[in-house]
Image (cartoon, grey):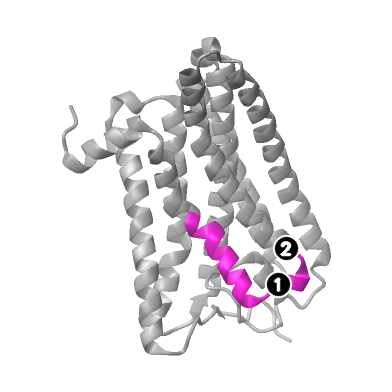
Protein backbone atom coordinates (compact mmCIF):
# COMPACT_ATOMS: atom_id res chain seq x y z
CA UNK A 1 0.00 0.00 0.00
CA UNK A 2 1.29 3.44 -0.89
CA UNK A 3 -0.10 6.81 0.04
CA UNK A 4 -0.23 10.19 -1.64
CA UNK A 5 3.16 11.15 -0.18
CA UNK A 6 4.89 8.47 -2.26
CA UNK A 7 3.16 9.35 -5.55
CA UNK A 8 5.16 11.90 -7.51
CA UNK A 9 3.19 11.83 -10.76
CA UNK A 10 0.02 10.61 -12.42
CA UNK A 11 -0.34 9.04 -15.85
CA UNK A 12 -2.95 10.61 -18.12
CA UNK A 13 -4.89 8.74 -20.79
CA UNK A 14 -2.96 7.89 -23.95
CA UNK A 15 -5.31 8.23 -26.92
CA UNK A 16 -3.03 6.16 -29.13
CA UNK A 17 0.45 4.65 -29.24
CA UNK A 18 0.91 5.47 -32.93
CA UNK A 19 3.25 8.44 -33.34
CA UNK A 20 1.51 9.80 -36.44
CA UNK A 21 -1.86 9.81 -34.66
CA UNK A 22 -0.33 11.50 -31.62
CA UNK A 23 0.90 14.31 -33.86
CA UNK A 24 -2.53 14.47 -35.52
CA UNK A 25 -4.18 14.83 -32.09
CA UNK A 26 -1.65 17.53 -31.24
CA UNK A 27 -2.57 19.42 -34.43
CA UNK A 28 -6.32 19.12 -33.75
CA UNK A 29 -5.98 20.28 -30.15
CA UNK A 30 -3.70 23.13 -31.24
CA UNK A 31 -6.24 24.30 -33.83
CA UNK A 32 -9.06 24.20 -31.25
CA UNK A 33 -6.94 26.03 -28.69
CA UNK A 34 -5.96 28.76 -31.16
CA UNK A 35 -9.62 29.20 -32.17
CA UNK A 36 -10.57 29.67 -28.50
CA UNK A 37 -7.70 32.13 -27.98
CA UNK A 38 -8.67 34.10 -31.08
CA UNK A 39 -12.41 34.25 -30.36
CA UNK A 40 -12.15 35.13 -26.68
CA UNK A 41 -9.18 37.43 -27.28
CA UNK A 42 -11.19 39.40 -29.84
CA UNK A 43 -14.09 39.77 -27.41
CA UNK A 44 -11.77 40.89 -24.61
CA UNK A 45 -10.04 43.44 -26.84
CA UNK A 46 -13.27 44.69 -28.40
CA UNK A 47 -14.95 45.30 -25.04
CA UNK A 48 -11.84 46.86 -23.50
CA UNK A 49 -11.21 49.22 -26.44
CA UNK A 50 -14.74 50.28 -27.41
CA UNK A 51 -16.13 52.73 -24.85
CA UNK A 52 -19.66 52.04 -26.12
CA UNK A 53 -19.37 48.51 -24.72
CA UNK A 54 -18.48 49.70 -21.21
CA UNK A 55 -21.86 48.59 -19.83
CA UNK A 56 -22.76 45.94 -17.22
CA UNK A 57 -23.75 43.34 -19.84
CA UNK A 58 -20.42 43.58 -21.63
CA UNK A 59 -18.47 43.83 -18.37
CA UNK A 60 -19.83 40.40 -17.41
CA UNK A 61 -19.19 39.12 -20.94
CA UNK A 62 -15.57 40.25 -20.61
CA UNK A 63 -15.31 38.21 -17.39
CA UNK A 64 -16.85 35.21 -19.15
CA UNK A 65 -14.32 35.41 -22.00
CA UNK A 66 -11.50 35.63 -19.46
CA UNK A 67 -12.83 32.54 -17.66
CA UNK A 68 -13.16 30.61 -20.92
CA UNK A 69 -9.54 31.39 -21.75
CA UNK A 70 -8.51 30.20 -18.31
CA UNK A 71 -10.53 26.97 -18.47
CA UNK A 72 -9.20 25.84 -21.82
CA UNK A 73 -5.64 26.92 -20.96
CA UNK A 74 -5.74 24.77 -17.82
CA UNK A 75 -6.15 21.49 -19.70
CA UNK A 76 -5.26 21.66 -23.41
CA UNK A 77 -1.62 22.85 -23.24
CA UNK A 78 -0.62 19.92 -21.02
CA UNK A 79 -2.50 17.46 -23.24
CA UNK A 80 -0.82 18.94 -26.33
CA UNK A 81 2.61 18.70 -24.68
CA UNK A 82 2.01 15.04 -23.90
CA UNK A 83 0.99 14.35 -27.51
CA UNK A 84 4.02 16.21 -28.84
CA UNK A 85 6.60 14.63 -26.53
CA UNK A 86 5.00 11.15 -26.45
CA UNK A 87 4.48 11.07 -22.69
CA UNK A 88 1.56 10.62 -20.29
CA UNK A 89 2.99 12.06 -17.08
CA UNK A 90 1.74 14.96 -15.02
CA UNK A 91 3.35 15.71 -11.67
CA UNK A 92 1.42 15.25 -8.42
CA UNK A 93 1.51 18.97 -7.67
CA UNK A 94 0.78 19.80 -11.30
CA UNK A 95 -2.34 17.65 -11.11
CA UNK A 96 -3.45 19.38 -7.90
CA UNK A 97 -2.92 22.82 -9.48
CA UNK A 98 -4.81 21.79 -12.63
CA UNK A 99 -7.75 20.50 -10.59
CA UNK A 100 -7.79 23.62 -8.43
CA UNK A 101 -7.98 25.95 -11.41
CA UNK A 102 -10.63 23.81 -13.09
CA UNK A 103 -12.91 23.92 -10.04
CA UNK A 104 -12.12 27.59 -9.47
CA UNK A 105 -12.76 28.79 -13.02
CA UNK A 106 -15.80 26.61 -13.70
CA UNK A 107 -17.43 27.57 -10.38
CA UNK A 108 -16.87 31.26 -11.14
CA UNK A 109 -18.26 30.77 -14.65
CA UNK A 110 -21.48 29.26 -13.35
CA UNK A 111 -21.90 32.05 -10.78
CA UNK A 112 -21.20 34.58 -13.52
CA UNK A 113 -23.82 33.06 -15.81
CA UNK A 114 -26.28 33.45 -12.93
CA UNK A 115 -25.34 37.12 -12.54
CA UNK A 116 -25.77 37.61 -16.29
CA UNK A 117 -29.31 36.23 -16.00
CA UNK A 118 -29.98 38.83 -13.30
CA UNK A 119 -28.56 41.53 -15.60
CA UNK A 120 -30.99 40.54 -18.35
CA UNK A 121 -33.87 40.40 -15.85
CA UNK A 122 -33.23 43.94 -14.63
CA UNK A 123 -32.67 45.28 -18.16
CA UNK A 124 -35.99 43.89 -19.45
CA UNK A 125 -38.25 43.76 -16.39
CA UNK A 126 -37.00 46.83 -14.47
CA UNK A 127 -35.34 49.07 -17.08
CA UNK A 128 -35.97 52.27 -15.10
CA UNK A 129 -33.94 50.90 -12.17
CA UNK A 130 -31.11 49.46 -14.28
CA UNK A 131 -28.61 52.23 -13.54
CA UNK A 132 -29.27 51.99 -9.79
CA UNK A 133 -29.29 48.19 -9.45
CA UNK A 134 -26.39 47.58 -11.82
CA UNK A 135 -24.08 50.51 -11.33
CA UNK A 136 -20.33 50.12 -11.63
CA UNK A 137 -19.92 49.45 -7.91
CA UNK A 138 -22.68 46.82 -7.86
CA UNK A 139 -21.22 45.08 -10.92
CA UNK A 140 -17.74 44.99 -9.38
CA UNK A 141 -19.16 43.63 -6.11
CA UNK A 142 -21.10 40.86 -7.86
CA UNK A 143 -18.10 39.89 -9.98
CA UNK A 144 -15.86 39.83 -6.90
CA UNK A 145 -18.42 37.65 -5.08
CA UNK A 146 -18.43 35.20 -8.00
CA UNK A 147 -14.63 34.97 -8.06
CA UNK A 148 -14.45 34.64 -4.28
CA UNK A 149 -17.11 31.91 -4.16
CA UNK A 150 -15.31 29.98 -6.88
CA UNK A 151 -12.03 30.21 -4.96
CA UNK A 152 -13.56 28.88 -1.74
CA UNK A 153 -15.34 26.08 -3.61
CA UNK A 154 -12.09 25.02 -5.28
CA UNK A 155 -10.11 25.10 -2.01
CA UNK A 156 -12.75 22.92 -0.32
CA UNK A 157 -12.64 20.30 -3.07
CA UNK A 158 -8.87 20.15 -3.45
CA UNK A 159 -8.20 20.06 0.31
CA UNK A 160 -10.60 17.14 0.71
CA UNK A 161 -9.47 15.16 -2.31
CA UNK A 162 -5.70 15.43 -1.85
CA UNK A 163 -5.83 14.60 1.84
CA UNK A 164 -6.97 11.06 0.95
CA UNK A 165 -4.37 8.26 0.90
CA UNK A 166 -3.89 6.88 -2.64
CA UNK A 167 -2.97 3.25 -3.16
CA UNK A 168 -4.72 2.12 -6.35
CA UNK A 169 -2.03 3.09 -8.83
CA UNK A 170 -1.47 6.43 -10.51
CA UNK A 171 -3.19 5.98 -13.87
CA UNK A 172 -6.05 8.34 -14.76
CA UNK A 173 -8.30 7.35 -17.65
CA UNK A 174 -8.70 10.95 -18.79
CA UNK A 175 -6.64 13.49 -20.75
CA UNK A 176 -6.58 15.84 -17.72
CA UNK A 177 -6.82 15.48 -13.95
CA UNK A 178 -10.46 14.86 -13.08
CA UNK A 179 -11.79 14.60 -9.53
CA UNK A 180 -13.74 11.31 -9.89
CA UNK A 181 -10.61 9.66 -11.35
CA UNK A 182 -8.51 10.85 -8.39
CA UNK A 183 -11.06 9.58 -5.87
CA UNK A 184 -11.04 6.15 -7.52
CA UNK A 185 -7.34 5.84 -6.63
CA UNK A 186 -8.05 6.24 -2.92
CA UNK A 187 -7.45 3.24 -0.67
CA UNK A 188 -9.78 4.59 2.02
CA UNK A 189 -13.54 4.67 1.89
CA UNK A 190 -14.09 7.98 0.13
CA UNK A 191 -17.85 7.51 -0.22
CA UNK A 192 -18.71 9.88 2.64
CA UNK A 193 -16.38 12.56 1.31
CA UNK A 194 -17.80 12.17 -2.18
CA UNK A 195 -21.31 12.63 -0.79
CA UNK A 196 -20.26 15.74 1.14
CA UNK A 197 -18.52 17.31 -1.86
CA UNK A 198 -21.37 16.39 -4.18
CA UNK A 199 -23.89 17.91 -1.76
CA UNK A 200 -21.99 21.22 -1.60
CA UNK A 201 -21.69 21.33 -5.40
CA UNK A 202 -25.34 20.32 -5.86
CA UNK A 203 -26.51 23.19 -3.63
CA UNK A 204 -24.43 25.63 -5.64
CA UNK A 205 -25.66 24.26 -8.98
CA UNK A 206 -29.28 24.00 -7.87
CA UNK A 207 -29.35 27.46 -6.31
CA UNK A 208 -27.92 29.08 -9.44
CA UNK A 209 -30.17 27.03 -11.74
CA UNK A 210 -33.33 27.99 -9.83
CA UNK A 211 -32.31 31.65 -9.92
CA UNK A 212 -31.65 31.51 -13.68
CA UNK A 213 -34.94 29.69 -14.33
CA UNK A 214 -37.00 32.15 -12.26
CA UNK A 215 -35.27 35.09 -13.93
CA UNK A 216 -36.17 33.82 -17.39
CA UNK A 217 -39.75 33.07 -16.42
CA UNK A 218 -40.10 36.75 -15.49
CA UNK A 219 -38.18 37.84 -18.60
CA UNK A 220 -40.38 35.86 -20.99
CA UNK A 221 -43.53 37.13 -19.31
CA UNK A 222 -42.29 40.70 -19.73
CA UNK A 223 -41.18 40.20 -23.33
CA UNK A 224 -44.52 38.69 -24.35
CA UNK A 225 -46.24 41.82 -23.06
CA UNK A 226 -44.20 44.06 -25.37
CA UNK A 227 -46.69 45.27 -28.02
CA UNK A 228 -44.37 45.54 -31.03
CA UNK A 229 -42.83 42.52 -32.73
CA UNK A 230 -39.59 44.44 -33.28
CA UNK A 231 -39.35 45.16 -29.56
CA UNK A 232 -39.90 41.50 -28.71
CA UNK A 233 -37.25 40.41 -31.19
CA UNK A 234 -34.74 42.90 -29.79
CA UNK A 235 -35.39 41.72 -26.23
CA UNK A 236 -35.09 38.06 -27.21
CA UNK A 237 -31.88 38.74 -29.13
CA UNK A 238 -30.17 39.88 -25.92
CA UNK A 239 -31.34 36.79 -24.02
CA UNK A 240 -30.90 33.95 -26.52
CA UNK A 241 -27.08 33.95 -26.53
CA UNK A 242 -27.00 33.74 -22.74
CA UNK A 243 -29.59 30.95 -22.74
CA UNK A 244 -27.60 29.04 -25.36
CA UNK A 245 -24.38 29.34 -23.33
CA UNK A 246 -26.12 28.26 -20.09
CA UNK A 247 -27.76 25.28 -21.82
CA UNK A 248 -24.49 24.15 -23.41
CA UNK A 249 -22.58 24.49 -20.14
CA UNK A 250 -25.15 22.82 -17.88
CA UNK A 251 -26.35 19.99 -20.11
CA UNK A 252 -22.86 18.65 -20.76
CA UNK A 253 -21.46 18.98 -17.25
CA UNK A 254 -24.57 17.56 -15.54
CA UNK A 255 -24.75 14.55 -17.84
CA UNK A 256 -21.00 13.96 -17.49
CA UNK A 257 -21.14 13.74 -13.70
CA UNK A 258 -24.66 12.40 -13.10
CA UNK A 259 -24.93 9.82 -15.87
CA UNK A 260 -25.91 6.26 -14.81
CA UNK A 261 -22.93 3.98 -14.05
CA UNK A 262 -24.34 1.42 -16.49
CA UNK A 263 -23.46 3.61 -19.49
CA UNK A 264 -20.09 4.76 -18.18
CA UNK A 265 -16.98 4.01 -20.25
CA UNK A 266 -13.56 5.57 -20.76
CA UNK A 267 -14.33 6.74 -24.29
CA UNK A 268 -17.67 8.27 -23.24
CA UNK A 269 -16.00 10.03 -20.29
CA UNK A 270 -13.43 11.57 -22.66
CA UNK A 271 -16.11 12.73 -25.11
CA UNK A 272 -18.24 14.29 -22.34
CA UNK A 273 -15.22 15.98 -20.76
CA UNK A 274 -14.31 17.39 -24.17
CA UNK A 275 -17.86 18.72 -24.55
CA UNK A 276 -17.98 20.59 -21.25
CA UNK A 277 -14.34 21.70 -21.08
CA UNK A 278 -13.35 22.46 -24.66
CA UNK A 279 -16.49 23.15 -26.68
CA UNK A 280 -17.95 26.05 -24.58
CA UNK A 281 -14.77 28.21 -24.64
CA UNK A 282 -14.62 27.79 -28.43
CA UNK A 283 -18.33 28.29 -29.09
CA UNK A 284 -19.18 31.08 -26.62
CA UNK A 285 -17.52 33.87 -28.68
CA UNK A 286 -19.47 32.77 -31.77
CA UNK A 287 -22.73 32.47 -29.83
CA UNK A 288 -22.43 35.97 -28.36
CA UNK A 289 -21.28 37.64 -31.56
CA UNK A 290 -23.73 35.87 -33.91
CA UNK A 291 -26.81 37.95 -32.99
CA UNK A 292 -25.08 40.96 -31.43
CA UNK A 293 -24.43 43.77 -33.89
CA UNK A 294 -22.46 45.87 -31.36
CA UNK A 295 -20.01 43.04 -30.66
CA UNK A 296 -19.59 42.28 -34.38
CA UNK A 297 -18.87 45.93 -35.15
CA UNK A 298 -16.38 46.22 -32.28
CA UNK A 299 -14.63 42.98 -33.26
CA UNK A 300 -14.36 44.17 -36.85
CA UNK A 301 -12.77 47.39 -35.62
CA UNK A 302 -10.28 45.35 -33.62
CA UNK A 303 -9.33 43.31 -36.68
CA UNK A 304 -9.04 46.35 -38.92
CA UNK A 305 -7.49 48.60 -36.26
CA UNK A 306 -9.88 51.49 -36.84
CA UNK A 307 -11.08 52.52 -33.39
CA UNK A 308 -12.13 56.13 -33.08
Question: How far is the residue under mark 2 from the one under mark 1?
Answer: 7 Å
Q: Which residue is mark 2?
A: 259
| Secondary element at image label 1 | loop
Disc on res. 264: 1
**From the image, which quarter does the C terminus lie in?**
top left
Tell which of 88 and 206 is nearer to you.
206
Find residue 213 and report its horizontal and vertical position in percent.
68, 34
- Dominant secondary structure of the residues highlighted in magenta in the image: helix
* Image position of 247 with respect to 161: above or below: above
Q: Report the side of 268 relative to 23 (left or right).
A: right
Q: Report the side of 236 relative to 182 (left or right).
A: left
Task: Check contact, mark 2 vs mark 1: CB within 8 A.
Answer: yes
Find residue 75 and report its horizontal and vertical position in percent.
48, 64
Crowdedness near tag 1: few (<14), some (14–19) or many (≥20) residues, C-alpha within 10 Å: few
Find residue 211 and report its horizontal and vertical position in percent.
68, 33
Q: Is residue 272 magenta?
A: yes
Looking at the image, which residue is at 40% across and 76% down? 25
Q: Which residues are magenta?
A: 259-279
Amino acid sequence: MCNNSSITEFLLLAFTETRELQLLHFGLFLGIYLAALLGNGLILTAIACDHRLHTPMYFFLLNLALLDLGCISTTLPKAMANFLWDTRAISYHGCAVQLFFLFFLMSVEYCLLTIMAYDRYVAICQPLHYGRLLGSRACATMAAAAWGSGFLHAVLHIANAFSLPLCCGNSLNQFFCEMPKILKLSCSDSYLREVQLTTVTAFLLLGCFVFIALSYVQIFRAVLRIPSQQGRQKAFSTCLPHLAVVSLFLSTIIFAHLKPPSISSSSLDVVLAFLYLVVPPVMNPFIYSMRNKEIKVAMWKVMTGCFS
